[in-house]
Image (cartoon, rainbow, N blue to C red):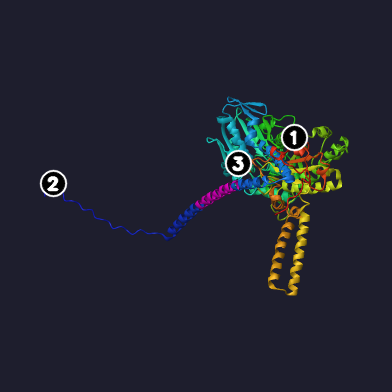
Amino acid sequence: MTARQKAPKYRKTKKRRPSYIDPVLEEERAKRVAKIQAKRQTKIDEVKRSLERRRNNKIAIQNARTDKREREEQKAIRDAHKTGSEKIMLQIRDDLSQIAETGIRCVYTSMIIPEKIKYDGRSILSIKGVRYRLKNNLHMVGWGKEAVTMSAAFERVVGKHLKKGWMVVPRKSIFMMWSYPEAFPPLDSRISYVEAGTDGQPDEKSVIETRRILNYCKKLKKKDLLIVMLSQGIDDLLCLPRETITLRDKLRVLNRLKAADATPEEINTVRNKLSAIRGGDLARMAYPARVITLITSDVSAEPMSQLSGGPCVYDPKGEKALAVLEKYKLLDRISLSVRDLIEETVPWAMAADKQLDADKHYKFVHRYVIACNADAMECMATEAFKKGLFPVKLNSTCLGDIQEFAREYVKITSLMILAVEGKINKLEMFLEMRDSPICPLTDEKVQEIFPAKDKWGLGMCLLLGGRPTVNLCSKPGQGGPNQELALYFSLYWYLRTQQYPILREYTVWFLGGSSYGKDGNTEAVGAFGYNSLGTNVYPEFEKAQSMYQSAHTKWWKLKEERRFESKIAEAQKEMLELKGVRNKYAAILPGRVLAENNTNLFFLNINGEDELLELKTGNYYTFTNVGDLHIIRIARFQCICDGVCHGHQEKVCADMECPVYQSLSAEAHSKFQYCCRLDQRKQDS
């Protein structure tokens, strides 16, 4: 080894000290990891449950469609074998169904938006004839289930002029939207759909999304155009408490007002006072942008100031809320933060509040009712005229109790018949109907609708609509307002025909249907009603009761005499079978089903479900709720069959000039038809 060469250096390895693990820190770390994993697993489970629910809902929709097709096929087979009076009843049902379905279809927002809102393809947007200039300045917000299809249809009209849109919709609406073609938005949609609300009550999601919308509207300029879409029943979606109170504080006050039986107007007054978006606050924040409010209304063709809280309608938010709480002695039972807001009695004075006209409406806000019952009645009148019936449009904004509806409908029907028979004049009809709680008629309206025999055609068709109120029992069953109204109408009409025998010479049918596609908590749209619909159940029940009592007496006698066990067993079996039949009729007695709000059970067990209304075209779920549609068909059958049509025995009528005979199809013309006993109830098999 030379001197220049150095000996290799060997690094001395250091002995590592064993790491010290603090058991306390390790335990805390393990807890944090476990907490993160549990949170992750909770989120995974939540997503799985959501996907499973959506899968089950999709399967349920597919099964419902399959069941509907099967029912339609089975019904078509049954209808093909019907003859005589049943055939005529079938044709009446078909005519009324087509009239009602025409009205329901014409208020689909996906159909009515392109009719009432036009775009020239360049820069002009026309809404009911009013022109607006577009230049990539269009913004859109909305709340409610109608906003799903309304916004999608509106975006198809305006295209890329829409810069941004937010829609706050009820739970499950997005899933339903993707399940129905008419609600499907464009693939490049600029609208964000957010689900909010829980069991009809606002939640934090409602507050967060509404605040996001309000903050977006604050940034709008004078050149911008804001479209606001509103519908009824959005209290759980349009919710944004003032900054100094919480959602819980606001709901507590409103619930106490409801418990004190405050009126809806009083509750809305307090709700608007505590809200940062209702009572015109949305318009205040969007100013100086122009605001267009598009409304789907269930009661009126005119914009209502308090519809959905009036987020674009001026409200000074003064002393009214304080007066309401003092009236119900709740001022001392609310939190201090809420009380401070309520006691602010100085009216608001922002820049937008200086833009008011003589009627206290914002000049920069335009309001339009896009869909309402009146639109449906126009289409129904056209369809009724095509059927050879003379349409009479009475009132599209009826409001009241369900029994008041039935009584007033029976009253106006009987008055129309008595007028045709010359038993009353116009003045008498006016005096009878001017103070009606459901359908008041003015002198001009009586002059317009007073019937004449030469205008009847094949009959008269009274068209009405509105929102009947149903008083629910403690444990309501399956039913809906239209099914209850159909049954009530049938019972009241039967009593009226007993009072005025001349009414028996006319065949009167009622049909009530929901524009939403579902009546109450059932899958049916509505139901039919006529003279003997409800009364024919009682004789069947009495017959079943008598047979059961006879069988019970026979079984008891054999048991007392200690006869053969086989005979006793046979008698007991027969008695139990008859008991089941009796209980079946007892369960569907009109008085019982009406008291239990279980009218759907009644209609499911008579006439093979023929008296239930189902949509034959489109989907059973319409996304549009503008109230209920009601049709009353009045016809007198006059023929040369020696009065057979109004007798008590079925005979063959061969009168070629009979209106019923003329209204039948070509295939039916080749057969003799029955003109009488149109209301005969089909016996249960």
Residue labelled with disc 1: 388
| Residue 319 in view in this figure | no
Q: CA distance from mark 3 to mark 2?
A: 86 Å
Q: Position of residue 419 (x, y in %)?
A: 85, 37
Q: CA distance from mark 1 to mark 2?
A: 125 Å
Q: Residues within 10 Å of mark 2 (few under 14, many from 20)?
A: few
Element class at badge 1: loop
Give, as a single range, the part of the protein colored magenta.
Answer: 43-65
Q: Are marks 1 and 2 in contact (CB under 8 Å)?
A: no
Residue 47 covered by magenta stretch: yes
Closer to the camera, 303 or 432? Answer: 432
Residue position marked by numbered label 2 in the rendering: 4
Q: Is residue 83 above or below residue 34?
A: above
Label of residue 420 in the image: none
Q: Are marks 3 and 2 in contact (CB under 8 Å)?
A: no
Q: Does residue 497 appear in this view?
A: yes
User: Where residue 631 appears, x then y in whole percent?
Assistant: 74, 40
Q: Quadrant of residue 457?
A: top right
Residue drawn 37% across and 59% down? Answer: 20
Q: Nearer the viewer, mark 3 or mark 2?
A: 3
Would residue 617 be counted in the magenta stretch?
no
Judge by depth and name the residue closer to the eye, 526 or 2. 526
Q: Position of residue 575 (x, y in %)?
A: 72, 65
Residue 168 numbered mark, or none: 3
Q: Amino acid at mark 3?
A: Val
Residue type, numbered disc 1: Gly
Tell me the quadrant of the picture where the C terminus can be found: bottom right
